[in-house]
């Protein structure tokens, strides 16, 4: 049995990109943005990498080649449903890391730190949190009075008080595979989302808490790591961040 499967969600149509090109293939500094995600994940030496495709799936398959496995999400039923599609391929691994294909600025060191934090705990999952004054539509991380993570509430479902929370869910998780695959079918359907409702991966956090688990987490000190590219403006912003980091790296290398 393998140690770690990485599941990359790349089924989004990316309508706001105003392009026929699948969103994750939009070039960032000359490379498809999903390649940066694959590079970051490769630093963990996973046993299996699974890319969940949807719109433009054949183009994504052709661009990435034979070194990753592909599964298709034929219905747009949310992130929980998307991860479920990967089970048949990733079922032979003990742990699962879930990432988004449109978050190209995630650093390998951050994923390694999250993986380490997860393995130090004894619960079924660990999550990445980003602190930012610009919520960008991310779900809010709700804590209890003792500071323990209790749930993730999607922005559309937040109360006014929850909307003021600046701890955001980055959508990056490590899971115990057996726990993940047994709990995904238990996710509730959010009937008011999408055409046929959606299953939210975020609900797994509340389910784990309800079972008595404490949720380990890592807070990234760089909000740009959680930048999800959904528009041409986001792409330009990500490119600017990448260029700055490359220049900074060159300068520190020369020093």
Image (tube, helix red, strand yellow):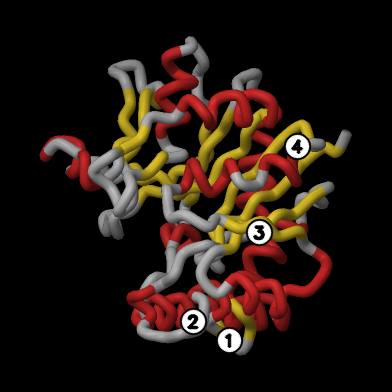
The residue lying at 38 percent from left, 75 percent from top is: 234
- Whichever of callouts 2 and 4 sits on the residue coming sooner in the sequence is 4
**Inter-mark Cα distance, 2 to 4:** 35 Å
Q: Residue furthest left?
A: 160
Residue that numbered label 3 is attached to: 51
Residue that numbered label 2 is attached to: 239
Tell me: residue 29, above or below residue 191.
below
**Inter-mark Cα distance, 1 to 4:** 35 Å
The residue lying at 53 percent from left, 49 percent from top is: 82
Residue that numbered label 1 is attached to: 29
Discs 1, 3 touching: Cβ within 8 Å: no
Residue 14 visible to an observer of this rendering:
yes
> Which residue occupies the foreground of this view, 34 or 188?
188
- Whichever of callouts 4 and 3 sits on the residue coming sooner in the sequence is 3
- Whichever of callouts 1 and 4 sits on the residue coming sooner in the sequence is 1
Crowding at label 1, few (<14), some or many (≥20) Cα neighbours within 10 Å? some
Residue 244 visible to an observer of this rendering:
no
Quadrant of residue 28 within the rendered picture:
bottom right
Rendering coords of residue 114 (x, y %): 62, 41
Q: Secondary structure at mark 4?
A: loop
Can you tell which of label 2 and label 3 is closer to the viewer?
3
Rendering coords of residue 23 (x, y %): 49, 75
The residue lying at 52 percent from left, 77 percent from top is: 22
**Inter-mark Cα distance, 4 to 3:** 14 Å
- Whichever of callouts 1 and 2 sits on the residue coming sooner in the sequence is 1
Q: Secondary structure at mark 3?
A: strand
**Inter-mark Cα distance, 2 to 3:** 23 Å
């Amino acid at each position: 049995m393998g140690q770690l499967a990485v599941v990359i969600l790349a089924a989004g149509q990316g309508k706001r990109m105003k392009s026929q090109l699948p969103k994750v293939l939009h070039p960032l500094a000359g490379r498809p943005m999903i390649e940066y995600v694959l590079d970051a994940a490769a630093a963990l030496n996973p046993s299996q990498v699974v890319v969940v495709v949807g719109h433009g799936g054949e183009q994504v398959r052709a661009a990435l080649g034979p070194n990753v496995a592909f599964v298709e999400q034929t219905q747009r039923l949310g992130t929980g449903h998307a991860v479920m599609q990967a089970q048949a391929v990733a079922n032979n691994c003990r742990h699962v890391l879930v990432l988004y294909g449109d978050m190209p600025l995630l650093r390998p060191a951050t994923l390694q730190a999250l993986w380490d934090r997860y393995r130090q705990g004894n619960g079924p999952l660990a999550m990445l949190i980003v602190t930012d004054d610009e919520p960008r539509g991310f779900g809010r991380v709700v804590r209890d009075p003792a500071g323990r993570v209790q749930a993730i509430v999607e922005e559309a479902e937040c109360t006014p008080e929850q909307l003021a929370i600046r701890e955001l869910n980055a959508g990056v998780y490590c899971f115990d595979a057996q726990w993940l695959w047994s709990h995904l079918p238990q996710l509730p359907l959010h009937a008011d989302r999408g055409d046929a409702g959606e299953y939210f991966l975020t609900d797994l956090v509340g389910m784990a808490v309800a079972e008595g688990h404490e949720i380990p987490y890592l807070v990234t000190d760089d909000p740009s790591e959680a930048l999800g590219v959904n528009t041409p403006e986001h792409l330009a912003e990500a490119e600017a961040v990448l260029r700055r980091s490359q220049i900074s790296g060159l300068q520190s290398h020369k020093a």
